[in-house]
Image: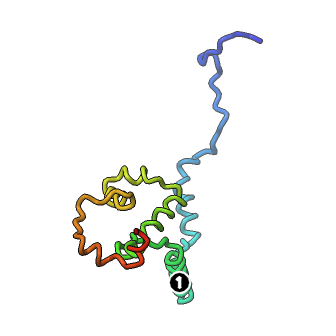
Amino acid sequence: MDNKKIRLADLPKINPVQTPDSYFEDLPQRIQARVHQQPAKVLKPHWTARHSWLSAGAAASVAILMYLSWPTRQDSIGVETLSQLHSEDIVQYLEHENVSVLDLSEVSKNKILIDSLSNNPLPAVRVSKKEILEQLSLEDIDDII
């Protein structure tokens, strides 16, 4: 292999491509002649009533599918619904779901609920002896005695 350096000045100046005589002078006339020979095709929209009905049907199908597959919004459980449950049922549910009372007690909103589930009385509740006796039945008193 030769390690000779090639210089552009040493290369012969040969033009391998040749054009016919007066090619570029006649080019615009030839282009114009071809344009006048072939009439231009104008594309017209081909829209029929069938296309309109198919488009409306496709749009309705998409709307129905979106309505059926859109997730429903879940509202929070109202206070009235929770007030019908016993505290023991709530505690059993939380134990079943592996939610500890300590997890709930970290949230300040749940402090009142945690206090009501424990054996400690609520500090803000003021109940008279008369009200307690009105709520107790004779069977409950016999059980206590």
Q: Residue at x 54, y 68 (%)?
A: 36
Residue 27: % across, % down? 55, 53
Give the camera-side residue of 65 and 18. 65
Query: Which residue is the extreme one toward the bottom?
Result: 49
Question: Crowding near pointer 1: few (<14 within 10 Å), some, many (20+)?
Answer: few
**Colouring used for the render:** rainbow
Question: Is the N terminus in the top left, top right, bottom left or bottom right quadrant?
Answer: top right
Residue 78: % across, % down? 36, 73
Q: Quadrant of residue 50?
A: bottom right
Q: Residue at x 37, y 50 (%)?
A: 106
Give the camera-side residue of 134 and 89. 134
Question: Is the C terminus in the top left, top right, bottom left or bottom right quadrant?
Answer: bottom left
Residue 55: % across, % down? 53, 82
Asked whether, in this view, residue 19 is left or right of residue 115, the answer is: right
Q: Residue at x 29, y 78 (%)?
A: 134
What residue does disc 1 label?
A: 47
Asked whether residue 45 is in view, the answer is no
Query: Which residue is the extreme one toward the right?
Result: 1
Instruction: Give the answer, above or below, for where 69 lies relative to 17.
Output: below
Give the camera-side residue of 53 and 71. 71
Kind of residue at badge 1: Trp
